[in-house]
Each structure stands twice: as structure tokens, then as C-alpha cells.
Amino acid sequence: MYNFDEEIDRTGTESVKWDEFPGTLPMWVADMDFKAAPCILKALQRRLDHGVFGYELLPDAYFEAISGWFAARHGWKGIGREHIVPTTGVIAAYSAAIKAMTVPGDEVIVQTPCYNAFFPAIRNNKCVEVHNPLRYEGGRYTIDFEDLARKAVDPRAKVLLLCNPHNPAGRVWTREELLAVGEICLRNGLFVISDEIHCELTYSGHDYTPWATLERDMVRHSVSCISPTKAFNIAGIQIANIFAADPDVLRKMDRAINDNECCDVNVFGATALQAAYREGGPWLDELRKYLKANAETVYDFLEKELPGVTALPLEGTYLMWLDCRNALHEGEPLEGFSERLAAHLREQAGLTLSTGTIYGPEGEGFERLNIACPRTRLKEGLRRLRDGVLSY
Ligand SMILES: Cc1ncc(COP(=O)(O)O)c(C=O)c1O
């Protein structure tokens, strides 16, 4: 019903993904090469046709769209206007949440390799990043609960910045895993900031568990940062929401969002969000099927043509985490390998990936591949990956 095979030329559109390394096939920045859902385009067009773009209030309908979507789709019931602080993006959301819940010098725990923009947000709030590295065993990542418990005990540790589902590991944390994390955090007074921007993009058998559907006390000591921008490919429109169940926590979030002057959202963001959450379900379901088939294309290709590179199982997100360590030359040090390989792929094979180590030193030996593009483009990217790795 929707044509995800359509190749749209994004070059010369000031796209970060396409115009930062011109002449290469960009499979790095996390946006998609698909047009947004028709329901969003129509709603934006209607808003555009009005022709006046002054400051706007957010209507009840905005909050009802969020509440309706999460209740129907994810079993997360009872979200009300009184639980939400809107803002300009998920980075703005979790940065303000860090600011609200810490003082300079406090520790923020992250589960590395993790989304690279977590690090500057911690630093900008004058906090200290502490790594709770994910465990990589049998080609799959899991949470190292013992290590988390050890780090959470430190009185300086105040926040866990969680990525649920996880970028770049591609894991969709199960309820059991999240409950185990929640127990450790509660026991140690650690506040949880759950970045759930990737929550809509999950595949067969891996359902997203909203942090806010865990036990009451875990939810009270947390905020969830949610947004339709990633799943509906409207990241440049910049809209997100912070959910807090506890009124005191919400007040703190509101204060921090105001202190950071990111409390007024874009008129197009509010319009797009409502269209996505109200009418975007069928488009999103088709997209998820397409992305799943893209992931299968990657597995098939690597198995047949490039067995030295392993793509980790993709439970969620459209970002595949590639274990490239078999491409290391004999005697070559692992340190710096991700960067050398990424540079080689870009310069010699015309393919831009995200270098594994931008997600923390734990990403050494890995690269991240964005598969959210038409399949013909994906296949071309895979050929370049093969040629680049083989000529490394
Ligand atoms: C985990 C995660 N959080 C946040 C963002 C960015 O959010 P925003 O553009 O809404 O600030 C991304 C983008 O890739 C992401 O992967």
C-alpha cells in the first residue's frame, strides 16, 4: 500500500546524512530515506495552507493523541496532560531531566556502547559519566546487572540514562530485564531517565515495554522521553515529550525545560505528532515489515558474501550493529580499528557508516549500519561494504 521502494534523491537538500560526506552512500545518521506517512504530509499541508505560523498553545487534542496511541498500541494507560512536558526533542528532554535530577559532580550511568549524544548531555550538565558496559556474549548483548549494582551503590551515582530499546545494540529490553534494572535503581536511589525514542520500531516477538508500565515506585522515580520523530521519519521537525508520573518530578522537569529555554515547540511538530499518533498506525506497520525484510537482506548478504562481518540480531531500531573484528589484520592492534575501517570504507568504497567507537570505547571493532532505505540502495551499500572490507 505504501511505496518504500521509491528512491528519493536527498542530495543537495542540506541533509546531514547525505550532504556531510558528498559522493558517498550514507548509511550512518539515524534518519530514513523514506517520505513521511501520507497522513502526516496531509496534516502538514493543511497547516501550511493556513499561512499563519504564530506562537501556539498545545490543545487537549495533542495530549489525547499521545495518550490514545500509547494505550492502544503499547498497553500504557492513563497518560494525561498533567503527566507531560513537551519539548523540542529527545536530546533536549533527557538533557533537561539530567539537569533536574543532579548537581554538578554527580554520576550518570550509561550502558555502553550507547547512543553517542548521551555523553555530551552528561558533560554539559557537569556530571560524570559512568559506564555499565553491556555484556556481549554469544553474539548478543545483555545487561550486566552485577556491574550495575556495584556502580549504583556509589553515593555519587544519581541517574541511570537508559536506552529502551537500545541504540546501537538493537536490543528491545524485556519486562524481566527492565524489572531487574528497576530493582537495582530503587534499592540504590538511582533515578531512571528512559529514552524511548526507538519504541515503535520493534520486530517479531520483541515487544517494547514502556518503563512507565513497570512497578509503581519504579515509575515514580523515573521519566520517559518519547517522540514519534524516529519512527515516522520527522526528526527535523523536532518534537518530543517527557512523561513523569510523579507531580514533583514533573514540576522539576518543567523547571529544567524552562531554564534551558526549550519549552516552546514548533507548530509543525505539534501537527505532525497528532497526525502520526492518530492515523499513522497502518503506515508504521508496513514500514516495520519493510525494515524487517531489509534486515533479512543484510543477514543473507553477509552470510553469502562477507562471512567475516556479523550483523547482530535486530530486535528493534533500524540500526544494525556490525561486528567487524574478523577483518582485523594479523598483528594489527584493535585500538583505532573501527575508525580506520570506517575511514577506509568511506574513502575507498564510498560508504559512510557510523564508527563503532563514537558509542564508547566498548564499540571498538564494530560499525553501525542504518538500513532505513529502499532495498536497492541497501543492496548497493552492502556491495560497497563487501568491497571495502575485502580491500581493507
Ligand atoms: C537513542 C536516541 N535518543 C535521541 C535521539 C535524538 O533525538 P532528537 O532528535 O529528538 O533530539 C536519537 C537519534 O538518533 C537516538 O537514537
Image: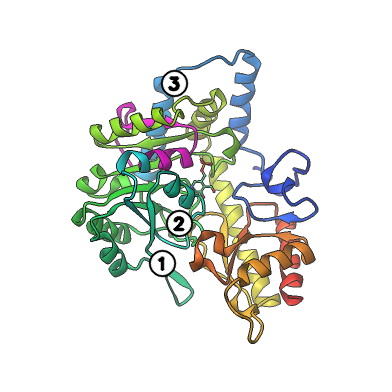
Mark 1 lies on residue: 134
* Residue bounds of the magenta highlight: 76-97
For the residues labelled 3 and 1, the Cα–Cα distance comes to 39 Å
Residue plotted at (21% across, 51% down): 189
Q: Residue at x 43, y 60 (%)?
A: 205
> What residue type is disc 1 on?
Leu
Query: Which of label 1 and label 2 is nearer to you?
Result: 1
Mark closest to the chain's N terminus, 2 or 3: 3
Q: Earlier in the sequence, mark 3 or mark 1?
A: 3
Helix, strand or loop at label 3? It is loop
Which residue sits at x=30%, y=27%? 82
Q: Disc 3 marks which amino acid?
A: Leu
Residue 237: give x, y in percent of width and height.
Answer: 58, 33
- The tag earlier along the polypeptide, 1 or 2, is 1
Q: Compared to 73, does 314 lie above or below? A: below
| Relative image position of residue 84 (x, y in whole percent) | 35, 31
Q: Is residue 95 magenta?
A: yes
Q: Which numbered marker is on residue 166?
A: 2
In this rendering, the label closer to the viewer, 3 or 1: 1
